[in-house]
Structure formats: structure tokens, C-alpha cells
Image: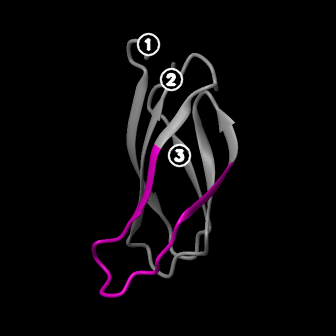
Amino acid sequence: AIYGGGSRPQTTAIGSGDSTVAVTFATAFPHASYKVASCEVVNTTDGSPLGISVQTITARATTGFTIALSCATDSANYTLDTIALIS
């Protein structure tokens, strides 16, 4: 079951040369036992964007999480689209 207000969809900008992304929720969860249900690296601007994948969640808090990418970005045209759910 998902509590009221139990999802956090978000788009987070990724800087050029970054290999990690810190996602910060606008509203904190009541605890850090949420699941990241969807996590996708997006770049619809560059002609030949890198095939970057999400690797590992390296930190988790009620206010957000940090995720490692498969490699560093080559431009600032990447975003990370995520949905976190609490049950």
C-alpha cells in the first residue's frame, strides 16, 4: 500500500562531467524505506548522447538519495527522471 502523499516524481538536472546525481525531494518522506520505482537518464538535446545507465543508489535519506551513473556525462543536457514510492 502507498501512504497518502507517498510518491515523489521528479526531474533532476545532471551537470556536465557528473557521474553521480543527488536527488532532493521537495517534501521529505516520513522514513527512508522508500523504493525508487523508476529511474531513467534522459537527453533529447544532443545529436549522439551517451548511453548512460543508472548503476547504484549510494546514499538514502528521507529528503532524497544519491545515485551513481555508468559514466560521466559529456554535456549538461542530461536529466534524471525518477519516481520514489513509499509503502
Q: Nearer the viewer, mark 3 or mark 1?
A: 1
Q: Is residue 67 left or right of residue 25?
A: right
On the image, the x and y values in percent for residue 20 come to 62, 61
In the depicted structure, whether residue 2 falls above or below residue 66:
above
Chain-order first, disc 3 or disc 1: 1
Quadrant in the rendering for residue 79: bottom left
Q: Nearer the viewer, residue 87 or 4?
A: 87
- Where disc 1 sits, the SS reads loop
On the image, the x and y values in percent for residue 68 come to 64, 59
Amino acid type indicated by mark 2: Ile
**Residue beneath label 2, please?**
86
Quick one: label 3, few (<14), some, or many (20+) residues within 10 Å? many
- Where disc 2 sits, the SS reads loop
Q: Quadrant of the N terminus?
A: top left
Q: Which residues are magenta?
A: 38-57
Chain-order first, disc 3 or disc 2: 3
Q: Which residue is depicted at the point 63% across and 48% down? A: 66
Q: Is residue 73 left or right of residue 78?
A: right
Q: Nearer the viewer, residue 49 or 64?
A: 49
Tell me, for residue 23, which label it has, or none: 3
Tell me, for residue 3, which label it has, or none: 1
Q: Residue furthest front?
A: 1
Q: Nearer the viewer, mark 3 or mark 2?
A: 2
The Cα atoms of the two marked residues, 2 and 1, are separated by 7 Å
Amino acid type indicated by mark 3: Val
